[in-house]
Image: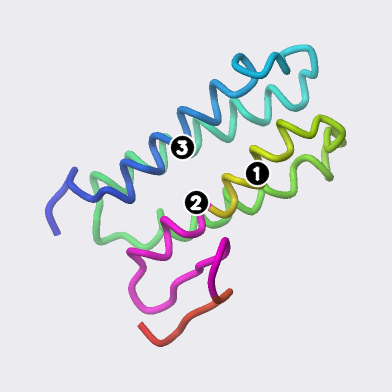
């Protein structure tokens, strides 16, 4: 595969940037737990997305994105900021989006979490 041309990886980089700026846009900087979760999650999504862009044949980045999506999804409840409905909703949105983007390009096993089967081994 050619490097730097998969739209799914660019989408993950974009979602990482959006997640990073979410506390600024919705004014959640006062809740440091929610803000730091968005900052760290966003930066990690950008790093993994860029890694996937440079290494299109590596499956490690695909699984890492799934794990990051899961961590971002459960963070409002585990870290105690589920009362911030907008930030918690954004975290849940990223879980579905990141799982779907990863699933469209996986090889043997795909993890379509947002709107499809949990594990599709038919590919």
Crowd rating for badge 1 (residues with CA inside 10 Å; few <14, some 14–19, many 20+): many
Pointer 1 residue = 72
Q: Is residue 66 above or below residue 23?
A: below
Question: Based on the displayed image, in which of its 4 quarters is residue 60 positioned?
Answer: bottom left
Pointer 3 residue = 15
| Residue 29, magenta (yes or no) | no
Majority secondary structure of the magenta segment?
A: loop
Say whether residue 103 is left or right of residue 54. right
Pointer 2 residue = 98
3 or 1: tag closer to the N-terminus: 3
Residue under the image location 87 percent in, 33 percent down: 83
- The range drawn in magenta is 97-116
| x and y percentages locating residue 52 in the rendered image | 32, 49
Calculate the distance from the C-alpha at mark 2 to the C-alpha at mark 1: 10 Å
| Residue 115, magenta (yes or no) | yes
Q: Secondary structure at mark 1?
A: helix
2 or 3: tag closer to the N-terminus: 3
Q: Are marks 2 and 3 in contact (CB under 8 Å)?
A: yes
In the picture, the disc for residue 119 is none
Q: Are marks 2 and 1 in contact (CB under 8 Å)?
A: yes
Q: Is residue 29 above or below residue 82?
A: above
């Amino acid at each position: 595969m050619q490097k730097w041309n998969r739209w799914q990886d660019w989408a993950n980089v974009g979602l990482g940037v959006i997640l990073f700026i979410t506390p600024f846009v919705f004014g959640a900087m006062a809740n440091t737990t929610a803000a730091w979760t968005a900052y760290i999650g966003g930066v990690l999504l950008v790093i993994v997305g860029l890694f996937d862009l440079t290494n299109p044949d590596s499956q490690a980045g695909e699984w890492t994105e799934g794990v990051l999506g899961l961590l971002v999804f459960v963070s409002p409840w585990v870290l105690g900021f589920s009362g911030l409905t907008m930030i918690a909703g954004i975290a849940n949105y990223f879980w579905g989006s990141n799982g779907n983007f990863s699933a469209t390009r996986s090889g043997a096993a795909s993890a379509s979490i947002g709107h499809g089967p949990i594990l599709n081994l038919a590919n």
